[in-house]
Amino acid sequence: MKIFQVALGILAAIGGFVDIGDLVFNSAAGATFGYQLLWVVVIGVIGIIVYSEMCGRIAAISKKAVFDAVRERVGFTAGLITLIAAQVVNLMTLAAEVGGVAICLRLLSGLPYRWLILLAIFALGVVVWVTSFEWIERIFGYGGLCLLVFAVAAIKLEPDWGDVAHGLVPHLETKDTLLYFYFAVGLLGAAMTPYEVYFYSSGGVEEEWTEKDIGLNRANAIIGYGLGGFLSFALMIVGGALFLPQGIEPETLGSIALGAQIPLGETGLVLALVGILLAVGGASIDTLFAGAYNFAQFFGWEWGRYRSAAGAPRFTLGWMVLLVLALGIVITGVDPVQLTEYAVIFSVVALPLTYLPILLVANDRAYMGSYVNGRLANVLGGVYLVVIVVISLTAIPLMILTNVGQG
Amino acid sequence: MSEELDIGLGVLDHQLLDSDGRRCGNVDDLAIEGEPSEEAEVVAILSGPGVWRERAGLLGRIAAWIGGGRRVRIPWNEVAGIESHVRLKKKASHYGLGRGDERARPWIAWFPGSDR
């Protein structure tokens, strides 16, 4: 295993894990419930590690990405329903991420928001067109590491570490039980958001992973997402230590960045905004590709970033159309943070049909040979599938009953 | 290709690859022949939007309409091998597969650097 390659992959995963959904839900959960929901982050991170590791292994051994597996295992009709649900959620997420990029640019430049939406779309299109996969990973993954400023801010705020540790143990200290569970479902949805596995598995196929890369896949998934979860912790601790006592509700990306500015000054603010810009920009590209991958894999088109744009024309046209549709949504002036909340909650509903086929294929000796799931992967995969089904059934009712988390 | 296989799990809905390794559609359905008293035999692969309308009711009909409704029949003896994908013996164009890519390519080629 190449240590350097592992390090690069891990660094990219840390920066790439946190997107607008994680920023919104972790900060808001901290501002509302302090550290009480930290345990949910742990559950969510272990879930995404379990299923990403499976996806990467499937990609390495059977050369199949998630929507190949969906189509083959649940059939055309259920697969088509899954595809539609996944693409609707993907588009909402993409629009929210693009809006997030524009908001960061506005906070950094002071220019009008709508012009910056156009600039963001144009810039994303150009980056995707001219930049290789490796450089996209490096620019956005490593740039997203600026978000570590929230970890420094969390320490500087001197939280009660006993309370923080207590947050890692599931407990309920609120009368607003529905809101508590709404945030729990949102945090799980944000951590296990499906586009991450669509993108991760397709990337594995693109990079032509083989059984030799199983160790690399495992290291990337465990350490990368694990440390990504560390950033989620930092955001929630900042929310609990700073926003909750002062009654601040981080309803905008700007107010989330305040979490670094108040303890660390202007440098903290700039690092937070640059980190958010690059993390959300990177997530926009991941989501964009995830959408194009899904279409191509479900319908059997040629796909891949490692081919020329004209070499996989419907795949290329796919991401271009998604970018234009995202522009159409975000230019209406819809609030990206609110759109994120809806996208995360709706993505939870689509989770079971995404993760079930992965578990089935990872257990199929015809595909996986001796690399089928071991007992640990199956126990964890099964438990998480039950969790996913439960939260998918409760997500929409909780969203309605809590008025989208407004209480 | 005459070995017995589980067509439900082993072939249906799998990716088709042509002789150059290009992805060129899916096994959307199979044509099966045989009298009730005989062993059924797969005689062809069916691929393309025209097949979807028979598989997914209203949703399939809408998808088929959007996709243009074409249907391609590939004789089973054109299958070179079945692994995790179904490999065909000749190029996609020989079977009339991958036409959507051919139609989309000029639009993409209009952008500079599209062949990089």
Image (cartoon, coloured by chain):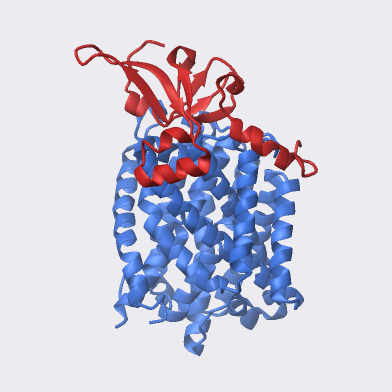
Which chain is the one coloured red?
Answer: B
Q: How many marks?
A: 0
Q: Is residue A3 visible?
A: no
Q: Residue at x 51, y 20 (%)?
A: B87
| Corner quadrant of residue A17 | bottom right
Q: What percent of the width, then of the height, locates residue A367?
A: 40, 28
Q: Residue at x 48, y 87 (%)?
A: A245
- Image hue for chain A: blue
Q: What percent of the width, then of the height, locates residue A54?
A: 43, 41
Q: Quadrant of the C terminus of chain A?
A: bottom left
Q: Residue at x 37, y 46 (%)?
A: B58
Q: Is A13 rendered above or below residue A368?
A: below
Q: What percent of the width, then of the height, locates residue B6?
A: 32, 22
Q: Residue furthest right?
A: B112
Q: Quadrant of the N terminus of chain A?
A: top right
Left or right side of B83 for B91: right
Q: Residue furthest bottom?
A: A246
Residue in front for this viewpoint, A235 or B25: B25
Q: Is B86 rendered above or below residue A196?
A: above
Residue in front for this viewpoint, A385 or A169: A385
Residue in front for this viewpoint, A365 or A271: A365
Q: What percent of the width, then of the height, locates residue A169?
A: 34, 68
Q: Is residue A62 visible?
A: yes
Q: Is A324 rendered above or below residue A115?
A: above
Q: Residue at x 53, y 79 (%)?
A: A251
